[in-house]
Amino acid sequence: MTAASVGRALPLAQRMSRLGTETAFEVLSKAKALERQGKSIIHLEIGEPDFNTPANVVEAAVDALRKGWTHYGPSAGLPELRQAIAGYIGRTRGVEVSPEEVVVTPGGKPIMFFTMLALVDEGDEVIYPNPGFPIYESMINYVGGTAVPIPLREERDFAMDVNEMAALITDRTKLIILNSPQNPTGGVLSRADIERAAEAIGNRNIMLLSDEIYSRLQFEGEPFSILSIPEMRERTILLDGFSKTYAMTGWRMGYGVMQTSLAAHITRLMTNSNSCTASFTQIAGVEALSGDQSAVGLMRTEFERRCRAFVNGINKIEGFSARMPKGAFYVFANITGTGWESKRLAGALLEEAGVAALPGTSFGRYGEGYLRFSVANSMDNLMEALQRIGAWAKRNL
């Protein structure tokens, strides 16, 4: 380092100040640091299935590697996988989709990011759920859009109020984000809710980003996609992927389904950023969609069992209460009875009780008064976490 460079400010672009983060990884890092110091930590912070990827999918990837699927592929995804996704969407959403409407990306987040980059200009308004996945708000702000939160309330089982959404629509609204089943609350939008949302949008030239990454982990009823409504077909970007459904978080593979003209632009963003998604993982993705689906059902059943047990346990602890989620693998617990702010309480439980959870404010300002617990851990660990939280509550409340 030269003397002239000492003390020189890093010339960051101004837009970097608008970029948020995902707190789960920050809390995970703190928890790992405490473990290195010898402290026992139960990890309920990270949103990742604790199951292994199904064996048939792993074998398909190994076979693909041996057969040489180790080179560049098309930026939009391998034709084999795009065709498999089109067929899968047809079976699960009841709407005919062509491979040309599919773009494969390394994880689901690029679809969120690319959608914002492609559609949202400075000052355009984006309506999104709050509490909600933090990358929504981060990306809206980063591209210069105006983030318009729609509160998700416990008394509605955290389902979006369609009338409230309709009242937020203005001439500047460019995009509306839906997420069902929802992270972090486990709330679900009913078919009636989604149909009424479509009616409220009407003929306005507003695009919809429908985040359906947890669609196969809904506990009751059949998931319904706004993509299935003919009037919304051309205005919907459906986001789905393999991480949650098939326990493939480390494989980094998601996709978007959208009108072909938008798919071309999203593909150009892929070319400019990632080039393509890893070829051998895409071949494994074909097997995931077309092969044995029994592992998905087993995971869904187990997550529901764990959620129910954790909700029953947390409701017995002073200051804590929770509703049974309708999907995903999170319990969004109300902690207003403790008198503690969510970030302070999450920190105390981590450092003093050895339980890692996320403050509700990690998911937006309307998350204050809540903690998110991921039940993607063993039942034994979940019961131990409840004992630790209960013991902490007796000492501190």
Image: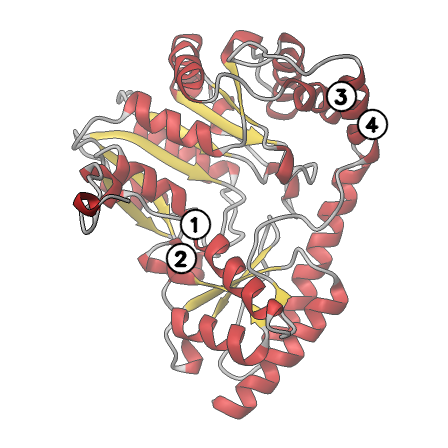
Lower position in the chain sequence, tag 1 or tag 3: 1
Q: Dot 3 corresponds to which residue?
A: 290
Rendered location of residue 173, percent (x, y): 23, 31
Q: At x 63% / y 38%, what residue is drawn?
A: 250
Lower position in the chain sequence, tag 2 or tag 3: 3
Q: Dot 2 corresponds to which residue?
A: 362
Lower position in the chain sequence, tag 1 or tag 2: 1
Relative horizontal placement of residue 295, taking residue 138 as reference (left or right): right
Q: Secondary structure at mark 3?
A: helix
Kindly identify which numbered label has been placed on residue 37. Answer: none
The image quarter in which residue 317 lies = bottom right
Q: Number of numbered discs present?
A: 4
Q: CA distance from mark 1 to mark 2?
A: 7 Å
Mark 2 Cα within 10 Å, few/some/many (few <14, many 20+)? many
Mark 1 Cα within 10 Å, few/some/many (few <14, many 20+)? few
In this view of the protein, which residue sits in the foreground, 252 or 198?
252
Q: At x 63% / y 18%, what residue is drawn?
A: 85
Can see residue 276? yes
What amino acid is found at the position of numbered circle 3 in the picture? Ser
Vertical order, 364 against 270 (above or below): below
Rendered location of residue 286, percent (x, y): 71, 19
Vertical order, 316 against 220 (above or below): below
What amino acid is found at the position of numbered circle 4 in the picture? Glu
